[in-house]
Image: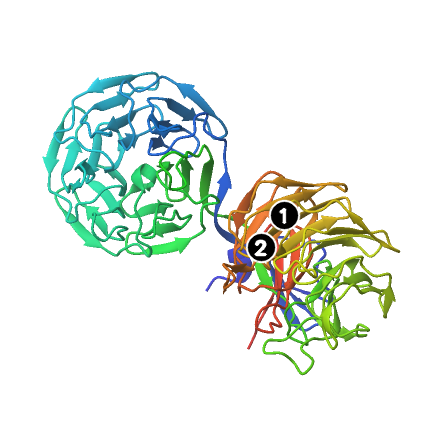
């Protein structure tokens, strides 16, 4: 049997303290803690933002790879079919020669230098064109006019088109095979449908999935083509239509189903991966949409354009898919001693403070004064707040200097203006807020310079826009949020911060940036949420995680802000809401939350962390 050193290239070392700069894969035994530890890199899947199309459109065709893509045709605002073609080099799109016939809902196959466009509409047509890297040329037509069909093929000498619609409401199951010169009718799909997706290598190897049959609406049916017949295999986990040419994959055994529309006509960001036997849900698109142009493989793909479900709205955004790459990761930390929600927090991933909070069902007082300090490994109880309370605001640089502000008291009942200062040993009451507030305020800064905004205030049950600035001694009212709301996620310092999500009364995606003087609306979150967690040092770098959707279900979603857009990253291990947080975009901390949680999770943005192994 091979040794660990033979497999990994390094031996297990015996040390008295953990190495300061371990390498990925390194394992050691710490004699002081008597623990076996290792340094690992988490691998996963992710969508990232690419360059925008020059012309926003949906129902377009796509061909090629992630770094050499061609899109063509489609429907562009204000509802005009287009012949425009664009080529992608991995970072930017360039307009090239147009199709001869403008159309949408067309079938597509091939590469960025040798592509095929077939059918489309409306009304449904049979026109076929081939691309040689410079121009489109009309070639022999389909035997059956159609639009909204599925298609497959990586070469313009061997392709397949299947399903679609001839003329509404007639869906077709007709399949045609292309040999580089002519189309030939072959065996039919088992299920006639339109707006389905396709993947596969050629006219002998294809996959058809999703679509709409006019009766059940969003379909989950998947069929495999072996060159002579279609046979049904395992369904998608979520039935959907509006997939069009957004299917990704160059074989029938490895594909992606991306986006589309659901039975309630809402668009989805859902992504599923096919391994030749079953579909598995994986990381979602950053922007939910249907009718995109897709290309590439199941490990390196691309989606461009699409629409939000309206025939007159178009999207220009491009997203790139990469599988089995280094990704960020949430890792379980030490549990709180007292489980609670609606608590305050301050500090960093390795030096944090948890204080106040509530219990559900309520504790005898309904709230807590408990304070705990975190050292990166474990929580320790320290001196309590002077006042028992919940739904507080909190901020501070570490577990030796923090502010607890506002909140709600059960005895006597009511909103609080109270502020308490933590010096590492005890809490001291200092000057009050000008306006009482509680319940999901945006709050960030240090013990000498901070901001509190939003939340619930007297007379504003669904959320106030009031903002106050702390200078280390006093609170001063400054410019309000653009939209009053409660249940906000937030992060930053006194002169540079963000407030996002929240409800007024419904969960939202709104994102506002604070520059030290004013709040400015910037790009929204991908997912509407309230009572989420936030971490980050400024208005250009943030992490939003967990929270609630629609005032009900708890989610585990995590989004990273780069100063321009939010990008979906790896989910939390356990969804929670109304928790406390600390840290930065790359090293964050979440603790407590819904259902009196004691759970702590640590975020490592590069996916590298030290793991303690359990031995027996």
Image position of 385 (left or right of 361)? right
In this view of the protein, can residue 32 be seen by the observer? Answer: no
- Badge 2 element: loop
Return the residue nearer the eye: 485 or 549: 485
Q: Position of residue 340 (x, y in %)?
A: 64, 73
Outermost residue, front direction?
A: 459
The residue at the point 50 percent across, 35 percent down is 50
The mark total stands at: 2
Q: Which mark is residue 114?
A: none
User: Which quarter shows the C terminus?
Assistant: bottom right
- Badge 1 element: loop
Q: Position of residue 35 (x, y in %)?
A: 65, 71
> Alpha-carbon neighbours of circle 1 within 10 Å: few (<14), some, or many (≥20)?
some
Outermost residue, bottom direction?
A: 364
Of pointers 1 and 2, the one earlier in the residue sequence: 1
Image position of 211 (left or right of 191)? right
In the rendered view, tell whether residue 243 sits above or below residue 575: above
Return the residue nearer the eye: 431 or 570: 431
In the rendered view, tell whether residue 36 sits above or below residue 228: below
Return the residue nearer the eye: 465 or 586: 465
Which residue in the protein does label 2 denote?
504
In the rendered view, tell whether residue 580 sits above or below residue 534: below
Q: Are marks 1 and 2 in contact (CB under 8 Å)?
A: yes
Q: Position of residue 272 (x, y in %)?
A: 37, 51
Say which quarter of the image contains residue 594.
bottom right
> Alpha-carbon neighbours of circle 2 within 10 Å: few (<14), some, or many (≥20)?
many
In this view of the protein, can residue 573 be seen by the observer? Answer: yes
Q: Which mark is residue 483?
A: 1
């Amino acid at each position: 049997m091979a040794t660990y050193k033979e497999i990994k290239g390094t031996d297990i070392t015996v040390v008295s303290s953990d190495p300061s700069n371990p390498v990925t894969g390194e394992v050691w035994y710490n004699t002081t803690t008597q623990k076996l530890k290792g340094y690992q890199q988490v691998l996963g899947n992710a969508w990232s933002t690419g360059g925008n199309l020059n012309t926003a459109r949906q129902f377009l065709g796509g061909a090629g790879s992630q770094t050499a893509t061609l899109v063509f045709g489609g429907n562009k605002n204000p509802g005009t079919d287009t012949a425009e073609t664009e080529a992608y080099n991995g970072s930017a799109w360039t307009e090239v020669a147009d199709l001869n016939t403008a159309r949408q809902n067309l079938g597509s196959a091939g590469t960025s230098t040798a592509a095929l466009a077939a059918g489309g509409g409306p009304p449904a047509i049979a026109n076929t064109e081939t691309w040689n890297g410079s121009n489109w040329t009309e070639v022999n037509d389909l035997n059956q006019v159609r639009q909204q069909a599925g298609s497959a093929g990586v070469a313009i000498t061997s392709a397949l088109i299947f399903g679609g619609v001839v003329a509404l409401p007639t869906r077709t199951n007709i399949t045609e095979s292309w040999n580089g010169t002519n189309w030939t009718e072959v065996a039919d799909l088992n299920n006639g449908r339109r707006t389905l997706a396709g993947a596969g290598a050629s006219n002998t190897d294809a996959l058809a999935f999703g679509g709409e049959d006019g009766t059940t609406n969003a379909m989950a049916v998947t069929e495999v083509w072996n060159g002579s017949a279609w046979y049904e295999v395992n369904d998608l986990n979520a039935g959907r239509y509006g997939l069009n040419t957004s299917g990704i994959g160059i074989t029938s055994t490895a594909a992606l189903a991306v986006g589309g529309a659901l039975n309630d006509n809402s668009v989805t960001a859902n992504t599923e991966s096919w391994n030749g036997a079953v579909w598995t849900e994986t990381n979602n698109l950053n922007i939910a949409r249907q009718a995109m142009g897709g290309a590439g493989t199941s490990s390196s793909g691309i989606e461009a354009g699409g629409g939000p479900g309206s025939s007159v709205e178009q999207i220009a955004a491009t997203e790139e898919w990469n599988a089995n790459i280094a990704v960020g990761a949430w890792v379980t930390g030490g549990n709180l001693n007292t489980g609670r929600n609606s608590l305050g927090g301050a500090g960093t991933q390795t030096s944090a403070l948890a204080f106040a909070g509530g219990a559900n069902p309520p504790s005898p007082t309904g709230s807590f004064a408990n304070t705990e300090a975190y050292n990166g490994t474990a929580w320790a109880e320290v001196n309590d707040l002077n006042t028992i309370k919940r739904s507080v605001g909190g901020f501070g640089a570490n577990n030796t200097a923090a502010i607890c502000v506002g909140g709600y008291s059960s005895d006597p009942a009511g909103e609080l203006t109270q502020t308490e200062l933590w010096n590492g040993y005890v809490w001291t009451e200092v000057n009050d807020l000008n306006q009482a507030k509680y319940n999901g305020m945006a709050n960030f800064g240090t013990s000498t310079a901070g901001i509190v905004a939003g939340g619930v205030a007297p007379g504003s049950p669904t959320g106030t826009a009031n903002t106050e600035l702390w200078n280390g001694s006093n609170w001063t009212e400054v410019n309000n949020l653009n939209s009053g709301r409660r249940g906000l996620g937030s992060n930053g310092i006194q002169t540079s911060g963000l407030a996002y999500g929240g409800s007024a009364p419904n969960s939202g995606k709104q994102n506002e940036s604070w520059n030290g003087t004013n709040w400015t609306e910037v790009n929204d979150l991908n997912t509407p949420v309230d009572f989420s967690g936030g971490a980050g040092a400024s208005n250009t770098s943030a992490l939003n995680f967990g929270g609630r959707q629609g005032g009900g279900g708890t989610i585990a979603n995590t989004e990273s802000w780069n100063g321009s857009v939010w990008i979906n990253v790896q989910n939390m291990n356990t969804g929670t809401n109304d928790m406390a947080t600390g840290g930065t975009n790359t090293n964050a901390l979440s603790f407590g939350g819904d259902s009196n949680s004691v759970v702590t999770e640590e975020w490592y943005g590069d996916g590298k962390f030290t793991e303690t192994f359990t031995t027996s």
